[in-house]
Amino acid sequence: MCDTIYVAAGGSAWFAKNSDRNPAEPQALCIVPRRPPSTALPLPGKTFAAADRGHSFVLSRPVWMEGGEMGVNEKGVAIGNEAVFSRFRASRDGLLGMAILRAALAHADGAAQARDLVCAIVESEDQGGNGAYKGRLVYSNSYIVAGADGAFVVETAGRRWAWKAIDSIATISNAYSIENDYQGLDEKTRAERIGSWRKRVQDRLYLGFTKGDSRRALTAGILRSALPDVSLETILSALRSHGGASPGRSGMAAPCIHEAGFPVRSSTTASMVFESLPSGGPASGVVWFSGRSYPCLSVYAPILLAGGEFLPLWTDYDYAEGAPASTAYWESGRSLAERSGGASRSGDLAFLARRDGIQERLQAASREAALAPSDARRLAAARREVGGAMSEWEDFLRGDPTSARDA
């Protein structure tokens, strides 16, 4: 299952998501380049009459599908989706929520536009489809959409939808969260004059195995305890949390999942953070991505968003959509984790010191580059530092004794 979080504090806004899917399912990050604008959005097997503005976007994508679990476009619009299970059944042949997410990134100049597009597609097209890498899993979707114009929780149930604005903090997981605080409803549900949206749509049978309520409470608690000084470390601690259990022993009850769950086997197969920076002009910020499973065993590499352009600071990763090299990177990470003791390694203080030391170097390099992203020499220096830190991290994971710079 999954977790998506948003927090605005101290002049910055943070969006983050863990993608929990079949443990063997590779997920790769790509940068989709700009395309000529169009009056119709492409969806699998059909088109939708809304503008494809041709935006470039970063997308974290299970390799077998066109859509993505999470992404950020050139306008600074960030979106993450969650599987939710409703009394109003999704269609076995409907649209995957990940396809809707991709369409919204291509379309939206702001969060409100992304919100409205998601609602329009859901109300006019069946959603569902088989979202499973192996076997079958059909579900509706909830989303956090965030941008310079604000942030929203959007929840859907079959062809129904509800949304609410986020004041400062919101976390969602695999359970409905909007009660009677909705600010928008589809016409059919509005006519029913409901009280709680959640009570109207939630299939309670699924709450026991998804553990969505407990994970949502855990991540929200971590964010609130850090206010007003939220930082990248705060966000990563939420994504890496095992909920106080021994590493790997929390099952589905905490965000960092290690091959747990019944009847659906699940692991955290990818993780991403978008740090939105204050800007008087085009969107700016830093995308941080793991490119691998298990946040607690990963460092996050930076991509700058500056002037509407994505500038990767780690140049040894292949950002092309469908690139075999990025899939191979994901697979190598899973293999390294299995050979080195898996989740238990994240309880090793020496491992944590190395991981956090590398992450601090990556953060320092990204800060330097963000000061003047158009300065070619500054950008090149940041890329050298990021490349060196990532190479050292890989050597450390492989057990290379020469990788001792920050030991």
Image: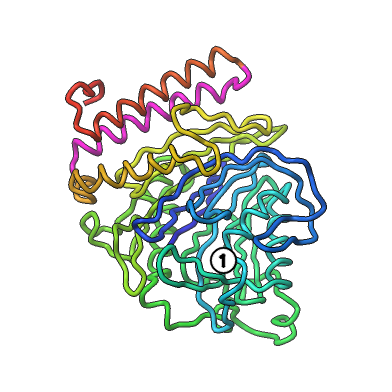
Q: What quarter of the picture does the C terminus occupy?
A: top left
**Magenta stretch: helix, strand or loop mostly:** helix
Check the image and name the residue furthest to the bottom: 192
Q: What quarter of the picture does the N terminus occupy?
A: bottom left
Picture layout, residue 55 above or below residue 41:
above
Can you tell which quarter of the image residue 160 is in? Answer: bottom right
The spot of residue 357 in percent (x, y) is 31, 30
Q: How crowded is mark 1: few (under 14 residues within 10 Å), some or many (20 or more)?
A: many
Residue 399 placement, left or right of 233: left
Specify the amino acid type for callout 1: Ser
Colour theme = rainbow
Check the image and name the residue furthest to the top: 377
Residue 68 placement, left or right of 268: right
Q: Which residue is drawn at 42% across and 83% down?
A: 205
Q: Residue at x 48, y 15 (%)?
A: 381
Looking at the image, how many numbered discs can be counted on the residues?
Answer: 1
**355 vs 95, nearest the viewer:** 95
Q: Does the magenta stretch include residue 237?
A: no
Residue 331 placement, left or right of 200: left
Q: Can residue 11 be seen in this view?
A: no
Residue 160 placement, left or right of 399: right
Q: Which residue is drawn at 58% across and 35% down?
A: 285
The spot of residue 145 in percent (x, y) is 62, 55
Q: Is residue 388 visible?
A: yes
**256 vs 148, nearest the viewer:** 256
Q: Does the magenta stretch include residue 349?
A: yes
The spot of residue 335 in percent (x, y) is 27, 45
Q: Name the residue under label 1.
A: 142
Q: Residue at x 72, y 40 (%)?
A: 35
Disc 1, SS: strand
Q: What's drawn in magenta, residue-wise?
A: 348-374
